Amino acid sequence: MKIFMTGGTGFVGTYLSKQLISQGHKITILILPVESNRLKTEGLTYLTGNSTVKGQWQESVPEHDVIINLAGASIFSRWTRKHKEIIRSSRITTTRNLVEALPNNSKHITFFSTSAVGFYGFHKDEELTESSPAGDDFLARLAYDWEQEALLAKNKGATVVLTRFGIVLGKNGGALGLMFPLFKYFLGGPLGSGQQWFSWVHIHDLAEAFIFLLNHKEISGAVNLCSPNPVRNKELGKSIGKILRRPSFMPAPGFIINLFLGEFGSVLLKGQRVVPRRLLDAGFKFHYPDIKEALRNSI
């Protein structure tokens, strides 16, 4: 199939595009003009444009069978009012422009719109599935609005799949790229109480889930892309420390995290316990369902 991808040069997009090309698919990645010197490879084409701005790039969208929307500014920073606006607009505007670019008769197109398990908000120990309601914090409201924009593609006949990502683990980037240095310098450990749940997914399983969904067109709507075995933050830190042979008992006090990160600190200190019920019911098999094996492969 011909696949149009935004956010394709990031940590997830780079890995996912390689896996899709290995399956014989052709990928077009939308890139900014400053990235236009990227080397082309077989099966991969770069198209210059800004997904948050309407332009000629939209004319290429109808030529594709699948749209994968991964674009969005990073949430891993202190949430000032300005940065929250950037986080929101980068997602909402890109999705709106992609939907606008779809032809009126898009029955042949599958639209994958990225979302996140943050959709559910914070529920302590409650197990959350795709049927659980949205939360009411900033990330939950953002995810809800983001998904609503994507669902408008149904009005043009497209099949819409809302992929709610857990925290993505893998080599050379992602969340572990931020965490490893702390452990290497003996500063790793639980965040706050360490009892909050951490819903995660290995990047290989995430890519395989996309391939699985491409081959199961009967699946649409929300799909949680996370391991069936979420872990508590304390267990995550202990597992990383054991693999790196570093202590993992140094806790980061919650008030310090909130002091430096503000509202974003709540995301790290509360979390949610999410399971991929629809993938499991459809027969998807995880290669890395266990956090220890996923970490060993990633370190």
Image (cartoon, helix red, strand yellow):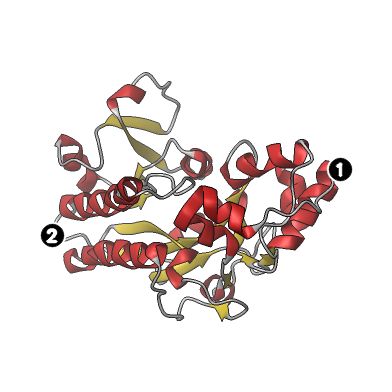
> Circle 2 sits on which residue?
104
Image quadrant in which you'd find residue 115: bottom left
Image position of 98 (left or right of 263): left
Residue 203: image location, x then y, percent:
59, 49
Q: Nearer the viewer, mark 2 or mark 1?
A: 1
Q: Nearer the viewer, residue 228 or 211?
A: 228
| Quadrant in which residue 173 is drawn | top right
Seen from the viewer's position, the closer of residues 183 and 213 is 183
Q: Quadrant of residue 181?
A: top right
Cα–Cα gap, marks 2 and 1: 56 Å
> Where is residue 241 drawn, in percent x and y?
81, 48
User: Can residue 290 be seen by looking at this rendering?
Assistant: no
Location of residue 40 with respect to 61 vertically, above or below:
above
Q: Say above or below: 104 vs 124.
A: above
- Residue at 34%, 30% (x, y): give it: 46
The percent coordinates of residue 13 (x first, y second) are: 46, 42
Q: Look at the image and tell me whether residue 77 can be seen.
A: yes
Mark earlier in primary sequence (2, 1)? 2
List x then y, in percent, for residue 213. Answer: 46, 62
Classed neighbour count for the residue bearing mark 1: other residues with Cα under 10 Å, few (<14), some (14–19), many (≥20): few
State the residue at coordinates (15%, 41%).
54
Residue named by callout 1: 245
What residue do we see at 44% from left, 49% from top?
75
Image quadrant where one finds the C terminus: top right
Q: Is residue 136 left or right of residue 266?
A: left
Please tell me the numbered disc located at residue 86: none
Task: Left or right? Give the position of 265 relative to 108.
Answer: right
Of 186 and 209, the residue lying toward us: 186
* Residue type of the residue flagged with mark 1: Arg
Q: Residue furthest top?
A: 37
Task: Identify the amino acid type marked 2.
Answer: Asn
